[in-house]
Amino acid sequence: MTRRIRTFGISPFTRRRLSKSPRHFWHWHELTVAFVALVGIGIGIGASIFTVPSADDAAAAGSENVMGWAWADPVGWISLNNLNAGSGGGTYGVNVDMTTGVMNGFGWSENAGWVCFGSSCSVPSCSGTVPPSVPLYNSMTAKIDPAPSIFGSTIRKAHGWAKVCNEAALGWISLNCEDLNPTVCGAYPYHVPLDLSTAQFQDPTGVGSPDNGTSFAWNGNSDLSGFGYIDFSQAYLVIPTENTDPLCSNGFDDDIDGAADCLDTECQPLASCYIPPIDETLCTAGNTDACCSNAIDDDFDSATDCDDTNCQGIASMCTVSWLKTKFGNVYAQKGIDAIAAPAEQYNATYCLSVTDGSVTGFASQIGCSGTSEELSLPKGSSDYQGSLGSIDIVGIRNGRYGQVVPIANGAGLPTSLDGRIYHYTGGGTLTLPAKIFRNGIGTAGRGNGLLFVDGADLRITENLSYEASTIDAYLRNLASFGVIVTRNPTTGVGGNITIDPVVTKMVGAYFAEISITTGDSPNPLEVFGLFASRLVNFQRTGGTVANAAETVSFDGRAVANPPPGMQDVGKSLPTTKDAF
């Protein structure tokens, strides 16, 4: 006998029609067309007198993860979550615990009222005794077995009970024929499957359900009443994202992607999932900083964290001390070895050129590096002659390049340099405070000038800068500051420039016979001009990935309007874009 139950009401989906019925249900349920039609009419008429459980009974927690609908021919659509469009019924939902498989909560039917699942059926409005079942499901329980987050087959099955609360003892819904005692699976082994590959409550590869593999539960009673098959194929499970604790440390595959906890790539950036690599070069996105700050020599090369060149220029905490030179080539006698610039940054605008040695950690913006002829800086033992030019120290002292003005301290250096040489011979250390050097004015105004620290050291304590205004007509007006610091050949004193840690800006062309030290400080330093010395000790640590700790920008003033006595050094530069 063919069974066809027509729908009541308007649904948001295409109306489904079932064409087969089981010959037996719990060994006693056999339906005829005439009787089913009568049951359908009775349910339609009775819809207006359905009662509703209290708000407390059916309240949802707001995190229910089952969405979509179930379908029963006599009553139409059953909403499994109030978030479904057009669901009605207030606030409710059905939930599946991903780790235990336990299924509970409420659905809602406009025609049948509340439908409870599992332990939620224990509320007074729905409670009762389930039909005879196997021991595991002989109570108000429902679950997906195995639980979704447990590794295993793709297809899982629901077991246990749901209930149409308004139908009292006649409202129990069996989610799987295997749970009944004795079993009634027979030719049509109905069940509600969960396909983890799609998160849908259906098994398109299964057999035995009324529509050959779709998802069905059953409600039927000994008095020949009931809704018959209830179709869950339009329901689905919302899969969580496994990328935070405790989901990344609970031992389950919460997002059912085949990887649990720290084996899941979405969990691996978490500190709790970090596993130190055997080589710093294996640091990957999301773990780079952790790898380069764990105080472990991961690759056993006697270099830990930021002292390891593999971390330099990669990890954020290892890029703070990088150096940048702008608009110039870089020349070195014994090679270049420095902390690499961060990704998409560079250390020099143009070429890197060394005489003897290699380039390590330094990058050219245009990718230019190579060897050059032997380089030498002017020094006292060679009468200040060098391959990069010469400094006529005797001529500077004697006024050959401009008027010599003796000074006793840094305050004696004016801001209008006027083409003069300011000569310090007081020994010890000359302290230079803040200065803003001004352009010359008119046809005779000269903006260049030289500070000559003769046989002593220079300490720069505050910022040095040029005035912001431009020159009108004469290049000689352009402010251009030069510094020469020499060593006393008799006492061995002098020849060093030290920069205080508070200094963040300097201008000028600086030559130190012995060394230039930028000062150990988190404050970035920006220099407009050039440095030349046997040793330049860059000590700043306050850079970022975007900005270098020290930036030396060749501004061309040493060539355009050379400071008195530094003309030959300017001529020695191959082009106006070079610096050393």
Image: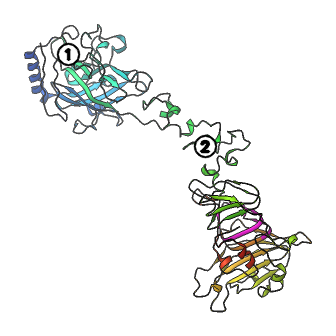
Query: Camera-side residue: 212 or 357?
Result: 357
Residue picked out by circle 1? 220
Main SS type for the magenta part? strand
Q: At x 53% / y 37%, what residue is drawn?
A: 268
Residue picked out by circle 2? 290
Position of residue 562 relative to residue 318, above or below, is below
Quadrant of the rendered image containing residue 61: top left
Quadrant of the rendered image containing residue 5: top left
The image's mark for residue 301 is none
Q: Which tag is nearer the camera, tag 2 or tag 1?
A: 2
Going by the numbered disc 2, the residue's amino acid type is: Ala
Number of marks in the rendered image: 2
Query: Camera-side residue: 89 or 263?
Result: 263
Placement of the C terminus among the 4 image quadrants: bottom right
Is disc 1 placed on a helix, strand or loop?
loop
Position of residue 211 relative to residue 571, above or below, is above
Residue count near mark 2 (Cα–Cα under 10 Å), binned few <14, some 14–19, many ≥20: many
Residue count near mark 1 (Cα–Cα under 10 Å), binned few <14, some 14–19, many ≥20: many
Position of residue 117 relative to residue 579, above or below, is above
First along the sequence among labels 2 and 1: 1
Q: Can you give x and y, in whole percent of width and height, for residue 220 in the image?
A: 20, 16
Q: Can you give x and y, in whole percent of width and height, for residue 297 in the image?
A: 70, 40
Is disc 2 placed on a helix, strand or loop?
helix
Going by the numbered disc 1, the residue's amino acid type is: Gly
Magenta stretch contains residue 543: no
Q: CA distance from mark 2 to mark 1?
A: 61 Å
Q: Magenta region: which residues?
A: 512-538
Q: Can you give x and y, in whole percent of width and height, for residue 287 in the image?
A: 57, 42
Q: At x 62% / y 37%, what residue is drawn?
A: 277
